[in-house]
C-alpha cells in the first residue's frame, strides 16, 4: 500500500527535482565549480542576486549564460565599461512620432528589463552607473522621468567582477554590495578539471543543454515553497547571533570583529542566512532548517557585508577569516 | 544526561575551590604558616560536591535545552529540537507537520543512547594542576614543620631574641662597667625587637647585632694603644734633642718613664721660654702622627694643636693614660672583661652568620636554611679579623676583568642616545666640478641621520582617524578610495 503524497509534499519534491536537474544541466557546460553552481541556484530560488568574483577566464559568464538557457527566461547581458551610462542600462525616454504626426516621449526599456541580467565585469563601470542597479535590484522596478517601470518576475542579477587589486576597477559601494544575496568566489580549476575544460571546448561539437523550466510561473511557485520551510526560534537565533557577532560595537561581537571590523553585516545578512538555510534543508531531504544550514550559508552570505577597518586591511585579514572565527567560537 | 551535567559542574566547582585554596596556600606558604591537612581537603571536596549538586538541581535543563544538547552532541541536525518545538505548536503548518514526521522517523531509527553515553568532562585534566600544586605545597609545609620542630623554635627572630637574653643574663653578673653597658644595650635591643612585627624581627635582629658588634669593637680599641702607635710617637719625639730621652724610654717599653721625662721637660719650658722653639719640631711630627694613626694617643693629640708646649702636655697625659691602661690589662679583672667582650663579639658574629661555632654549643642550628638569607640581609661591616669566612665563601663576588664585555657598552646605562628634535650636524656632499660653467645653489634638505621630533607611530596613530574619515567621505571617487587605503596600509608602522 502506497501513501499518496500531500500537495505540499509534491511541491517540495518538485523543487528538489527541478533544482537537481538544473544543476545537472549546468554541470554539462561548467566543469567543477559545484559550490558556485549550487550558490547561484540557491540565490535564484531564494529571489536574490549573486556577485561572482574571480579572475577572467574561469567560466563566470558561461555559467550565467547557460543558466538562462536552461531556465528559458529572458536573458540580457551588459558589458560594463568605464563610459557606460545609467541610461544604457535602465533605458531612457525618447521622442517618437505617431501616425498622426504627433510627437511624444516614449520609454525605451534598457537591458535591465529581463529575467536574468548578466552584469559582466560590473566593477569596471563608474560608481554612478553601478548605482543605477540599486533600485532595480531591491525593488524590482526602475523610475525614469518620474514614471515607475516594473521589471518582470523572476528577476535575477548575476554580476561578475575581477578582484579589486586589478587595474581600472571601481569597487562596488557598500549599499550595492548589501543587495547581493551571495558573493561567490570562483576559484581556479585543478589539473583534472582543466583537462575536462580543454577537452570540451576544443572538440568539434559543443555540449547541448536541455531546457528544464519553460514557464516563469514555475519558478515563482517554487520560490513560494522555499519560503514555507519552517524553522525553530533557536535556529533563527543562530542566524541573528552570527550577524550580531560581526558588529564590533555589540556585546556579542567576536574578538576578531572587535579588532578588525569597521561595519558588520546588515539585517539583510540575517534574512539571507535564513532563506539560504531553507533551501539547504530541502536539498538535504529535510523539511526544517537546522543550525548547520545557517552555518553553511554564512560565508557566501556575509563576506561582502563585512567592511574591514584599516587595521584589518593592513594586516591582510579577510572577512572570511572573521566569519570562520565566529562560527568556530560556538 | 543529568549525570553528565552533574559531572561537568562538579569538575568546575572543584576547580574553583581548588583554585581558591591554592591562592590561600600560596599566601600562607609565603608567610610561613602551616597550610594543609587531610580534614581541610575532605571538607573542600564535600563543599564542591554540595555546590555541584545544588547547581545541577537549580539549573536543571528544560526539555528544549535537553533537545539542543542531544542535537549538538549527536549531530542530528536539530531534529530533536524541531520535533519538540513543532509538537507543542497549536496550529502546525503542513510543512511543520511534514518536518515533525520526518524528525520522528529519524529519531525512531536513531540510537540515542550511543550519543548520550557518559564521557569525561573536558575540564577534568585541568584538575591535575591545582591538585599537583597543593601536593607540592603540602610536602613543602611538612618539610618546614619538621625542620622547625627539630630546632625547637618557630622563627629566626625568636631564636635571636633567646640568644640575646642568654648573653644579657651572663653579663649581669659581671663587675665591669663596659660589660654592664653591653648588657643594658642588649636589653634595649630586645625591647626594640619586641615592638616590631614578626616578619620584621629577623632583619631587626641582624641590625641590632651589627650595632652591638660596632660598640664592642670600639670599647676594645679604646682600651689599648697599639705598639705601632707607640713606635710612631717615639719616632716623633726623636725630632728634637730635648725629647730624645723620652723617646728612648718609650722604645724600651717604659711608657710611664717617658711621660715623666716629658713632664719634666715641660717644667723646664716654663722656666725658660726659649726652649719652646725646640719643641715646635716635635709638635709638627706629632701633628702628622695624629693624622696617620687611629689609636688612643693619636685621638688625644688631635684635640690639641695650639702650640708645641700644649702638644707635649697632651702627649704626656696620653702616655700616662696608656701606661695606666697597660697596667689595668695586666690585672686579672680587666683581662677577663676583655676576654668576655671578645667572646660576646665572636658569638654575635656566629649568630649573625648562622653558625655559632664550637663555643656556644648550639650545633642544631648549623646548616640552618635561613643562614644564607641572613648573610644577604646583613649590613654590618667586616669582623675584627678582617673578613668573615662565611662572607668570603657564601656571597658571590669577583673583580672586574681587564677586557670589555662582548655585546655591551662601557657605559652601564647603555650607549648615549640622540634626543629627538635635536638638529643633526650639517652634512656637506662632495663632488668634482667639470670644466664648463657651473651654477651653485644651496638646497635645504634633511641630512643624514636626521630625526623627527615626533615618533612615527605616534604621528601615524594621530593621523589615522582623520584619514579614515576622509576616505569615507562621498566626495572622494569610489574608484580612488581603494588606492588611498592601500597607500595608508603601506605606510603603516610595523608592529
Image (tube, rainbow, N blue to C red):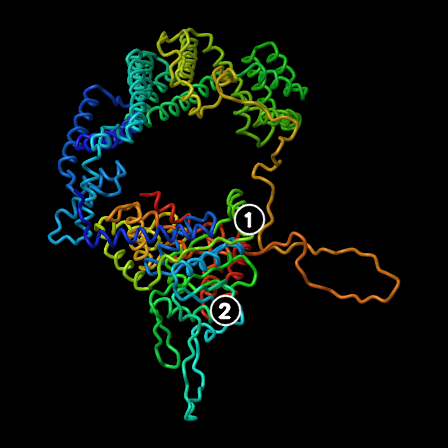
Where, by quadrant of the figure, is residue A228 drawn? bottom left
Of residues A291 and B215, the one nearer the viewer is: A291
Of residues B426 and B57, the one nearer the viewer is: B57
Q: Secondary structure at mark 2?
A: loop
Q: Which mark is residue A324?
A: none
Asked if residue B196 shows in the view, the reply is no
Q: Which mark is residue A126?
A: 2
Q: Quadrant of the N terminus of chain B?
A: top left
Query: Does B439 sit left or right of B392 as displayed?
Result: right
Q: Which mark is residue A198?
A: 1
Q: Position of residue A171 (x, y in %)?
A: 48, 62
Pointer 2 or 1: first along the chain: 2
Q: Are marks 2 and 1 on the same chain?
A: yes
Q: Nearer the viewer, mark 2 or mark 1?
A: 1
Of residues A158 and A145, the one nearer the viewer is: A158
Of residues B487 and A304, the one nearer the viewer is: A304
Asked if residue A66 shows in the view, the reply is yes
Q: Is residue A258 above or below residue A143?
A: above
Amino acid at each position: 500500500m502506497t501513501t499518496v503524497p500531500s500537495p505540499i509534499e509534491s511541491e517540495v519534491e518538485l523543487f528538489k527535482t527541478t533544482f537537481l536537474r538544473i544543476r545537472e544541466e549546468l554541470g554539462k557546460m561548467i566543469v567543477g565549480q559545484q559550490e558556485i553552481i549550487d550558490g547561484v541556484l540557491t540565490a535564484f530560488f531564494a529571489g536574490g542576486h549573486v556577485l561572482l568574483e574571480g579572475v577572467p577566464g574561469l567560466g563566470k559568464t558561461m555559467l550565467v549564460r547557460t543558466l538562462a538557457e536552461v531556465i528559458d527566461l529572458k536573458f540580457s547581458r551588459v558589458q560594463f565599461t568605464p563610459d557606460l551610462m545609467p541610461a544604457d542600462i535602465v533605458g531612457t525616454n525618447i521622442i517618437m512620432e505617431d501616425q498622426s504626426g504627433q510627437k511624444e516621449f516614449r520609454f525605451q526599456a534598457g537591458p535591465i528589463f529581463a529575467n536574468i541580467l548578466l552584469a559582466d565585469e560590473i566593477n569596471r563601470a563608474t560608481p554612478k552607473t553601478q548605482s543605477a542597479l540599486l533600485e532595480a535590484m531591491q525593488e524590482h522596478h526602475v523610475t525614469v522621468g518620474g514614471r515607475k517601470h516594473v521589471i518582470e518576475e523572476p528577476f535575477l542579477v548575476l554580476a561578475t567582477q575581477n578582484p579589486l587589486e586589478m587595474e581600472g576597477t571601481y569597487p562596488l559601494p557598500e549599499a550595492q554590495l548589501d543587495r547581493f544575496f551571495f558573493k561567490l568566489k570562483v576559484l581556479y580549476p585543478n589539473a583534472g578539471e582543466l583537462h575536462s575544460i580543454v577537452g570540451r571546448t576544443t572538440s568539434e561539437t559543443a555540449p547541448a543543454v536541455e531546457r528544464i523550466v519553460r514557464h516563469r510561473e514555475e519558478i515563482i511557485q517554487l520560490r513560494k515553497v522555499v519560503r514555507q520551510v519552517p524553522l525553530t526560534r533557536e535556529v533563527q537565533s543562530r542566524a541573528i547571533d552570527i550577524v550580531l557577532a560581526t558588529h564590533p560595537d555589540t556585546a556579542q561581537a567576536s574578538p576578531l570583529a572587535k579588532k578588525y571590523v569597521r561595519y558588520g553585516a546588515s539585517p539583510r545578512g540575517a534574512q539571507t542566512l535564513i532563506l539560504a538555510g531553507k533551501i539547504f534543508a530541502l536539498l538535504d531531504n529535510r523539511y526544517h532548517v537546522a543550525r548547520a544550514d545557517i552555518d553553511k550559508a554564512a560565508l557566501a552570505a556575509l563576506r561582502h557585508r563585512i567592511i574591514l577597518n584599516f587595521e584589518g586591511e593592513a594586516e591582510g585579514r579577510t572577512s572570511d577569516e572573521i566569519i570562520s572565527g565566529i562560527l568556530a567560537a560556538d | 544526561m543529568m549525570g553528565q551535567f552533574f559531572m561537568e559542574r562538579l569538575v568546575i566547582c572543584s576547580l574553583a575551590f581548588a583554585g581558591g585554596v591554592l591562592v590561600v596556600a600560596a599566601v600562607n606558604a609565603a608567610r610561613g604558616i602551616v597550610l594543609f591537612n587531610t580534614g581541610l581537603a575532605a571538607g573542600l571536596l564535600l563543599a564542591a560536591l554540595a555546590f555541584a549538586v545544588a547547581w545541577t538541581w537549580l539549573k536543571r535543563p528544560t526539555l528544549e535545552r535537553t533537545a539542543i544538547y542531544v542535537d549538538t552532541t549527536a549531530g542530528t541536525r536539530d531534529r530533536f529540537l524541531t520535533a519538540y518545538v513543532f509538537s507543542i505548536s497549536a496550529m502546525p503548518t503542513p510543512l511543520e507537520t511534514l518536518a515533525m514526521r520526518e524528525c520522528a522517523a529519524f529519531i525512531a531509527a536513531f540510537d540515542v543512547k550511543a550519543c548520550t553515553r557518559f564521557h569525561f568532562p573536558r575540564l577534568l585534566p585541568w584538575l591535575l594542576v591545582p591538585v599537583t600544586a597543593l601536593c607540592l605545597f603540602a610536602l613543602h609545609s611538612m618539610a618546614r614543620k619538621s625542620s622547625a620542630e627539630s630546632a625547637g623554635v618557630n622563627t629566626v627572630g625568636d631564636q635571636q631574641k633567646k640568644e640575646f637574653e642568654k648573653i644579657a643574663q651572663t653579663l649581669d653578673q659581671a663587675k665591669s662597667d663596659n660589660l654592664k653597658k653591653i648588657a643594658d644595650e642588649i636589653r634595649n635591643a630586645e625591647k626594640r625587637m619586641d615592638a616590631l612585627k614578626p616578619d620584621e624581627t629577623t632583619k631587626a635582629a641582624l641590625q641590632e647585632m651589627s650595632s652591638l658588634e660596632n660598640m664592642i669593637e670600639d670599647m676594645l680599641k679604646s682600651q689599648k694603644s697599639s705598639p705601632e702607635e707607640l713606635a710612631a710617637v717615639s719616632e716623633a719625639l726623636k725630632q728634637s734633642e730635648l725629647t730624645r730621652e723620652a723617646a728612648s724610654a718609650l722604645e724600651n717599653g717604659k711608657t710611664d718613664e717617658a711621660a715623666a721625662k716629658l713632664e719634666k721637660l715641660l717644667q723646664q719650658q716654663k722656666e725658660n721660654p726659649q726652649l719652646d722653639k725646640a719643641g715646635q719640631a716635635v709638635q709638627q711630627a706629632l701633628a702628622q702622627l695624629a693624622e696617620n694613626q687611629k689609636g688612643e694617643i693619636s685621638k688625644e693629640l688631635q684635640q690639641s694643636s695650639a702650640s708645641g708646649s700644649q702638644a707635649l702636655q697632651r702627649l704626656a697625659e696620653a702616655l700616662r693614660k696608656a701606661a695606666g691602661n697597660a697596667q689595668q690589662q695586666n690585672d686579672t679583672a680587666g683581662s677577663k672583661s676583655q676576654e668576655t667582650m671578645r667572646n660576646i663579639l665572636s658569638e654575635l658574629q656566629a649568630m649573625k652568620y648562622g653558625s655559632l661555632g664550637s663555643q656556644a654549643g648550639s650545633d642544631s642550628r648549623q646548616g640552618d636554611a635561613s643562614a644564607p638569607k641572613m648573610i644577604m640581609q646583613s649590613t654590618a661591616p667586616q669582623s675584627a679579623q678582617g673578613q668573615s669566612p662565611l662572607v668570603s665563601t657564601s656571597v658571590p663576588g669577583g673583580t672586574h676583568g681587564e677586557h670589555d664585555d662582548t655585546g655591551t657598552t662601557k657605559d652601564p646605562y647603555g650607549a648615549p642616545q640622540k634626543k629627538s628634535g635635536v638638529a643633526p650636524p650639517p652634512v656637506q656632499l662632495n663632488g668634482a666640478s667639470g670644466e664648463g660653467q657651473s651654477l651653485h645653489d644651496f638646497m635645504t634638505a634633511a641630512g643624514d641621520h636626521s630625526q623627527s621630533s615626533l615618533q612615527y607611530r605616534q604621528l601615524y596613530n594621530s593621523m589615522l582617524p582623520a584619514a579614515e574619515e576622509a576616505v569615507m567621505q562621498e566626495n572622494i571617487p569610489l574608484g580612488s578610495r581603494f588606492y588611498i587605503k592601500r597607500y595608508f596600509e603601506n605606510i603603516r608602522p610595523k608592529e
